[in-house]
Image (spheres, rainbow, N blue to C red):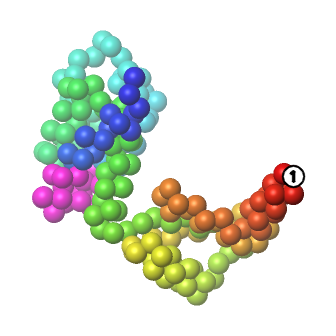
Amino acid sequence: MAELSTLARPYARAAFEYALADNALDKWSGMLAIAAAVSQQEKVADLLASPDVTSAELARVFNSLLGDALDDHGDNFISALAENKRLPLLPQISEQFEELKSQQQQVVDVAVTSAYELNESQQQMLASKLSETLKQEVQMHTEVDKDLLGGVLIRAGDLVIDGSVRGKLAKLAEVMNQ
């Protein structure tokens, strides 16, 4: 069976193109996030996996669960997913939609893990340098991991920059063991 992200891609792209044309990227982002969260609830996931429920019933139940969180176009999107038995792909669709939205808005989410809490000026300087390097606006999320010993670990999509002491020690050990 094809990978879930491959199956989700055309739906995410269709939703994105519609939302972009309708100037409603944020609205669709919210609708898809809520729908994805609902689809992952245990009872809902069981319902989605049930072979006894028709596509029309799934769409009706799912849309009723979401209530006012969806507009008419969102309801239609959910109905199309139900008809094609793709409702379980909502988390992947939402994730890919967010990636397309970030590309469109030239914003990249960056996760920075540091050994110690970064102060505001350090965060601003790091965000500025990353923005220059990546040539995109940076939305930075920070967390602390004392196991790094020092330095930072930066993740931006597929890019990983390991400037941590732990990472440097691991590289040194690898070189010495050869």
Q: Which residues are magenta?
A: 16-31
Magenta stretch encompasses residue 20 = yes
Name the residue: 36% across, 17% down.
Answer: 50
Location of residue 59 by image quarter: top left
Instruction: Looking at the picture, tell me which residue is in the foreground, 101 or 136.
Output: 136
161 horizontally vs 42: left or right: right
Q: Specify the amino acid type for callout 1.
A: Asn
Quadrant of image for the N terminus: top left
The picture places residue 141, in percent across and down from the top left corner, at 53, 67
Magenta stretch encompasses residue 4 = no
Name the residue: 27% across, 45% down.
Answer: 12
Location of residue 93 by image quarter: top left
The picture places residue 78, in percent across and down from the top left corner, at 22, 36
Instruction: Looking at the picture, tell me which residue is in the foreground, 63 or 114.
Output: 114
Q: Which residue is mark 1?
A: 177
Location of residue 46 by image quarter: top left
Name the residue: 29% across, 30% down.
Answer: 86
177 horizontally vs 9: left or right: right
